[in-house]
Amino acid sequence: MAEVLHASQDTCPVDAASAEATCPAGAASSATHGYEPLGPDSLTWQIWGTWTGMFQGLWAGSIQNMHPKLGAAVWDHSDFFGERWQRLMRSLYPISGVVFDSVIPGARTGEEVRDYHLTVKGTMEDGSRYHALDPDVFYWAHATFWYGNVRLCERFGPFLTEDQKRQLFEESKAWYAQYGVSMRPVPETYEDFLEYWDHMCRNVLRDHVSVRTVLDITQLPPPPFLSFIPTWLWDRYLVPQNQKLFMWLTTGFYDEPIREILGLEWTDKDERLFRLVGKGINLVMHKLLPKRALRHPRPRDAWDRVHGKVAVDAPIVHTPTRNLPPQSERGNPMHYCPVTAARRASYPGVLTAD
């Protein structure tokens, strides 16, 4: 669910009585379908929102775009490929905020994320229509978020029991309900979800130019925290190795049907090495490092509120100004774009104000 999609169509009235006919989101409203927001007692709060997810970044972006309609929307409307680090680093705030802003009085982050997509629609190459708030499209994006968390834990820890996976699925319903969209596509049980996921991988997902573009990081500059690396060193030596490493990691996270669609090989040797790497990452990231250091600023701030380190009614933490969209796009309502903010994250853990 990208926050970088540009408006080119009419708006989609998700809160209108006729929403099912005029907007694919269905009869959505500010109601959360009877689900309470997730809190610090949830398993999702315990294990999601950490920097470990960066290992899975290419998997998440590519498998989302393999949905034909979602891939078309990103390709037609997104400036993702022109500012990849900035877009990623600012998107993490509202996406994680759907879960972690539940402790902030009056926060409606889920509805804000939904509304970034109100006017994102267009026509596929075959003449069919797409809309970002089509229930099946919007839920697929959510599925990659919550189930990506399960897949990450399966590979790199913290390792989960089957009961914990079922708990995460049930919590994913409450998470999804915060968007105020139709719950029609949501499977009833965890087993139903696994069937849904397998069906999507085998019968719906497709290769697409947006998928290949996500997977190609040869033109990607250093991330902000590595900006001190000389350009010549990055381009000549680090880029080829990064492409090879992250493509290998991504292939390891893919289901076998996805590897077949994309023409990727995965051997028994690869699998053994991947499991060994996962054990090492679990040891370092989840056994040796303190949890607070692993958390993204928005989840970390939420936990600080719970523990009394930050006032419950303190302003929301927003992305650093370096991650804001280009000046020409800052008035676009489809961007998360906090031009001014009372509290901003400044890595590694300092907060600043405008």
Image: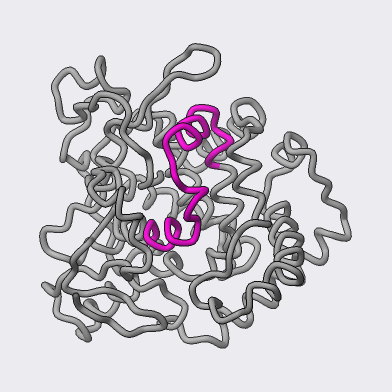
Tell me residue 151's x, y (percent): 59, 55
326 or 238: nearer the viewer: 326
Q: Is residue 84 left or right of residue 176?
A: right
Tell me residue 342's x, y (percent): 16, 73
Quadrant into which the C terminus falls: bottom left
Is 169 magenta? The answer is no
200 or 348: nearer the viewer: 348
Q: In which quarter of the image is residue 309?
A: bottom left
Q: Which residue is drawn at 42% across and 35% down?
A: 77
Tell me residue 214's x, y (percent): 60, 47
Q: Residue at x 25, y 14 (%)?
A: 21
In the displayed structure, 218 sits above or below 62; it is below
- The range drawn in magenta is 64-92
Q: Which residue is drawn at 50% across and 46% down?
A: 144
335 or 260: nearer the viewer: 335
Quadrant into which the N terminus falls: top left
* Residue positioned most to the top: 127
Q: In this view, does 221 lie to the left or right of 310?
A: right
Is 87 magenta? The answer is yes
Dominant secondary structure of the residues highlighted in magenta in the image: helix
